[in-house]
Image (tube, rainbow, N blue to C red):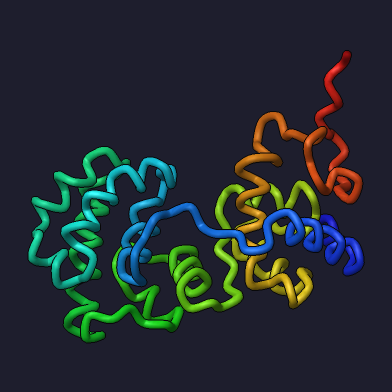
C-alpha cells in the first residue's frame, strides 16, 4: 500500500479545497436530523438527486418518526418507489422510526453506536449524520472518497475502514470537519472514475497520480 502524502502536501491540498469551497455541504436534502437519517439510509446504491426527488414530497408529510409511523409502510413504499431497493429500505425506515420513538423519545441520538443500532444505518450513514448534523469530524467514506483517497494518496487504504483511518491520521486537524465533503465533491465532479478531469483539477500539481488525463490537443 502506498504511503500517504506528507503533511505539507496534505495541508496545501486542503487549503486549496477550502479556498474554493469554504463551507462544503452535502447534497441530500433534509429539514432536521431525522430526515437526514432517512435520506442517507435511502441513498445507499442510489444517487442523491434521485433520493431528493422522492423525499421532497415525503418529508412534507413525514418529517418526524411519529409522522412516518402514521404514514405507514404502504404509504412510505408508494412514495419511494423510484429509489433502488425501495421495499427493503421502506421496512428499515419504519423500523428505525419505531426505535427512535420507543427508545429515544423521537429524537435522533448523537452517538455512533446508537445510530448504528438503527435498522439500515451502517457506519457510513452514522458518520454522515454525526458530521452534517452534529458537527463531528466523522469521515463517511463512499466510493468517491475511496477512489480519490487512493488515487491521490491523500488517504490510501485497501478498504473503506482503512481509508477512513487514513483521513483521520493524515488530513490536518483544521480540515477534518469538512474533509469528507471536499473529497466527495472532488470525486463526483473532477476526479471521476473513468476519465478524471485532470486539466481542470485545482490540485493537479500536488497529485502523484501517474495516469493523469492529458490536456486536450489544440
How far from the left and from the top, in percent, is residue 111? 44, 83
Q: Who is closer to the viewer here, 42 or 53?
A: 53
How far from the left and from the top, in percent, is residue 168? 69, 73
How far from the left and from the top, in percent, is residue 49? 41, 42
Residue furthest top in the image: 218
Q: Who is closer to the viewer here, 7 or 60?
A: 60
Tell me which residue sits at (35%, 47%) in the image: 51
- For residue 127, say whether it is visible: yes
Q: Quadrant of the N terminus?
A: bottom right
Tell me which residue sits at (62%, 63%) in the image: 23
Seen in the image, is 52 located left or right of residue 97? right
Seen in the image, is 5 located left or right of residue 129? right
Q: Is residue 72 above or below residue 193?
A: below
Q: Quadrant of the C terminus?
A: top right
Seen in the image, is 75 located left or right of residue 193? left
Q: Who is closer to the viewer here, 2 or 92?
A: 92
Tell me which residue sits at (24%, 61%) in the image: 92
- For residue 162, say whether it is visible: no
Seen in the image, is 42 located left or right of residue 177? left
Q: Which quadrant of the structure image shows residue 16?
A: bottom right
Tell me which residue sits at (45%, 70%) in the image: 129
Q: Is residue 127 above or below residue 27?
A: below
How far from the left and from the top, in percent, is residue 109? 36, 82
Amino acid at each position: 500500500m502506498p504511503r500517504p502524502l506528507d503533511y505539507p502536501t496534505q495541508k496545501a491540498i486542503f487549503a486549496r479545497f477550502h479556498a474554493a469551497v469554504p463551507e462544503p455541504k452535502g447534497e441530500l436534502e433534509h429539514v432536521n436530523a431525522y430526515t437526514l437519517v432517512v435520506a442517507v439510509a435511502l441513498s445507499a446504491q442510489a444517487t442523491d438527486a434521485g433520493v431528493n426527488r422522492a423525499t421532497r414530497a415525503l418529508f412534507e408529510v413525514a418529517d418526524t418518526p411519529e409522522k412516518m409511523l402514521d404514514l405507514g409502510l404502504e404509504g412510505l413504499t408508494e412514495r419511494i418507489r423510484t429509489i433502488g431497493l425501495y421495499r427493503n429500505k421502506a421496512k428499515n425506515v419504519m423500523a428505525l422510526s419505531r426505535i427512535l420513538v420507543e427508545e429515544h423519545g423521537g429524537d435522533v441520538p448523537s452517538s455512533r453506536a446508537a445510530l448504528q443500532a438503527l435498522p439500515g444505518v451502517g457506519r457510513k450513514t452514522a458518520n454522515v449524520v454525526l458530521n452534517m448534523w452534529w458537527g463531528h469530524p466523522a469521515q463517511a467514506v463512499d466510493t468517491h472518497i475511496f477512489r480519490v483517497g487512493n488515487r491521490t494518496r491523500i488517504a490510501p487504504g485497501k478498504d473503506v475502514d482503512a481509508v477512513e483511518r487514513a483521513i483521520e491520521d493524515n488530513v490536518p486537524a483544521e480540515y477534518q470537519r469538512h474533509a469528507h465533503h471536499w473529497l466527495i465533491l472532488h470525486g463526483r465532479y473532477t476526479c471521476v472514475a473513468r476519465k478524471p478531469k485532470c486539466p481542470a483539477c485545482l490540485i493537479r500539481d500536488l497529485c502523484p497520480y501517474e495516469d493523469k488525463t492529458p490536456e486536450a490537443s489544440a
